[in-house]
Amino acid sequence: MNDELKEIIRYAMYRCEINKRELSEYMSMSYPTMLSKLKKPDSLKISEARRLCGILNLDLNHLLTINK
């Protein structure tokens, strides 16, 4: 399930033409922290997931139900 979540985020970044460094800036996170969150996206806090979804135009409800 974690792999599916990673793939969804990766594809959304591609679609939005946002790289990891840019995403870390938009998320107000350090680059190493952003890399850690992308490696284990299930470690995202709800507020971080909400912000990520807003940046990448993802549905928060869908993102949250992937790990169920």
Image: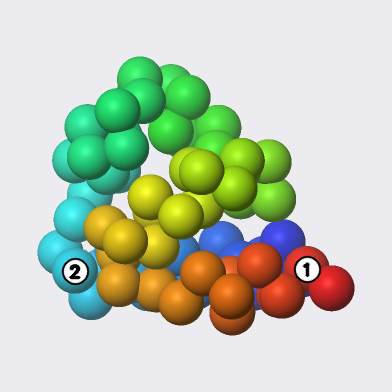
* Residue closest to the eye, 26 or 40: 26
Colouring style: rainbow
Residue at the limit of the structure toward the right, as seen here: 68
Q: Amino acid at mark 2?
A: Cys
In screen coordinates, is 30 left or right of 17?
right
Q: Quadrant of the N terminus?
A: bottom right
Question: In the image, what residue occupies the spot 56% across and 62% down?
Answer: 6
* Image x and y of residue 31, in percent: 34, 25
Picture coordinates of residue 39, whole percent (x, y): 59, 44
Q: Tag 1: residue type?
A: Asn
Q: Quadrant of the C terminus?
A: bottom right
Element type where label 1 sits in the image: loop
> Which mark is drawn over residue 67?
1
Residue 19, placed above or below residue 10: above
Q: Is residue 12 above or below residue 55?
A: below
Any part of residue 38 in sight: no
**At which x and y percent is residue 30?**
35, 20
From the top left corner, tell me how far across and down residue 9 is, in percent: 45, 64
Residue at the image point whose x is 51% and y is 69% from the top = 60
Q: Which residue is mark 2?
A: 16
Whether residue 23 is situated above or below residue 2 in the rendered picture: above
Judge by depth and name the residue closer to the eye, 2 or 44: 44
Q: CA distance from mark 1 to mark 2?
A: 23 Å
Specify the quadrant of the image occupied by residue 11: bottom left
Identify which residue is drawn at 22% across, 40% down. 26
Q: Earlier in the sequence, mark 1 or mark 2?
A: 2
Q: Residue at left 78%, top 68%?
A: 67
15 on left or right of 47: left
Task: Tell me the SS state at disc 2.
Answer: helix
| Mark 1 Cα shell of 10 Å, populated few (<14), some (14-19), many (≥20) | few
- Is the residue marked by circle 2 packed among few (<14), some (14-19), or many (20+) residues within 10 Å? few
